[in-house]
Image: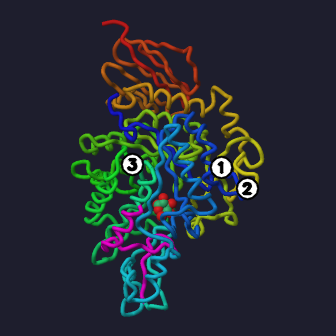
Amino acid sequence: MENSVWWKNGVVYQVYPRSFADTDGDGVGDIPGIVRKLDYLAEIGVDALWLSPFFPSPMKDFGYDISDYRGVDRIFGTSRDFDDLLREAHARSVRIIIDLVPNHTSDEHEWFVESRSSRDNPKRDWYVWRDGKPDGSPPNNWESIHGGGSAWEFDAATEQYYLHTFQVEQPDLDWRNPEVRAAIYDVMRFWLGRGVDGFRIDALPCVAKDDLLRDNPHNPGWREGMPLGMRQSRLNSEDAPAILEIIHQLRSVTDEFDGERVLIGEAYLPLERLMRYYGDSLDGLHLPYNFGLLEVPEWTPKTVGGLVERYEAALPEDAAPNWVLGNHDNPRVASRVGSGQARVAQMLLLTLRGTPTVYYGDEIGMTDAEITPGQTRDPQGIKDPAHNRDPARTPMQWNATENAGFSTAEPWLPIPDAKETNVESQAKDPRSMLALFRQLTRLRRETLALNVGSYVPLETGSRNVYAYLREHGGDRILITLNFGDEPEEINLPGDHKADLLSTTEMNPEAATFTETLSLRPNEGIVCRLRKTSG
Ligand code: GLC
């Protein structure tokens, strides 16, 4: 089959291990819980899991503060549990992608413990240490991404500041130091050798900072209500020229291993800068994450269609596109676009050109939960309550019982009412969102046009309908998405007939139409066009 590299068309599903399934009754999800749900994941058509960090960690940033890159935190299980997960996932043809966090460690990592112990410790320059200014203030004006405030912390024992782009407990490694690079590359070899299928690389642009650590300018686009960590434009604190060499090295290490391993990178950058991450001759990241759909200012055919066109136009030749609809750092899609549009959004994700990434629970339409200040656990949410990430991190809703089938104990974050929004009831209902999701993933697998086909936007004559064709070898798949809550009719030029493959109403009988296609409010339809004559 053409385009058979799995990461070019497979469905990636993000699991936030704390919130997926708890098997040992401590209210926190674990790796055996993920193993237990593999049949479900395979059955709904997931090709790969990306697991947020499960490594030993003081959990100041819920695992993104790593104190041992090669282990498994006790709260999530054991190294043997991880090997079970790899084996059981692979037995079901599900790949495992893990998080690589190269920019920073926990302050409890032994490297940092040594580094802070004295100015002449051999690990001192594994981290970014600087003297304060003559008046004792921090070395420059850089602010933390998590809630603003200085990104420097004064260490009284050695009388210098260290840099932390995120929490105080997450000191930044100094990637100008070749020993640091070698150490992280060995971490990659450790996991690749163990059998993981790739990495999602955390906060990648941050590893390349201005050599002179010059101040960042104010972000002219910042407005009241935006995250405090965005007040500065990160001109000098990330994405310095060295990034390209680092990306190339990350790729070379990955290429030491056979078996179609994948490198995915987290980089919130403008399109033209993001595209450089593919590498000059596609020898960089396989998939620099495309966060366009997380960032669209409004959910309309015009903005979404415009975004798709800009992305398509910016892609280097032969580069693999990808789309992300949700993750653990942003409000859930069903809350961003409104519950009525949640299905339309999944249909979009699963029919656009490129690898889709689905956030756990979005397949059943989970929405952001209400989290009171007293319940807030996210360190960013504590500093900047308007941008608390907890509402999108609540436990997976498996059934309608008290803790939604997630745990026998009180979960680490509260679970909203799961009476309808849960896997068990949706699995029984052929009209559920889960049923639609399953049908869409099946269709993707069976339909080459949806995997490798071209993307051709269509003029619909309606400002509420977004429509496009995916075409391959004469097979034409039409996708029409009604973004509005009024019925719509669109006319398709030419004389053709269409077999309806899927609608939000799951109505296989409504199989044909000629010229005019009617859409119900908030309805999306995918169909295969066939010419009736000529
Ligand atoms: C990334 C992660 C986020 C984390 C941060 C620091 O943005 O997705 O959850 O807090 O990096 O590691």
| Left-right relation of 339 to 68 | right
Q: Which mark is residue 308?
A: none
Q: Which residue is mark 3?
A: 290
Q: Type of residue at label 3?
A: Asn
Viewport quadrant of the C terminus: top left
- Which residue is at a point 57% across and 49% down the rendered structure image? 84
Query: Residue 226: x, y in percent?
Result: 48, 62
Q: Which residue is mark 1?
A: 21
Q: Secondary structure at mark 3?
A: loop
| Label 3 Cα crowd, 10 Å radius (few <14 / some 14-19 / many 20+) | many
- Which residue is at a point 51% across and 67% down the rendered structure image? 66
Q: Type of residue at label 1?
A: Ala
| Label 2 Cα crowd, 10 Å radius (few <14 / some 14-19 / many 20+) | some
- Which residue is at a point 57% across and 39% down the rendered structure image? 41
Q: Which mark is residue 25?
A: 2
Nearest the viewer among 89 and 438 is 89
Whether residue 181 is in magenta: the answer is yes
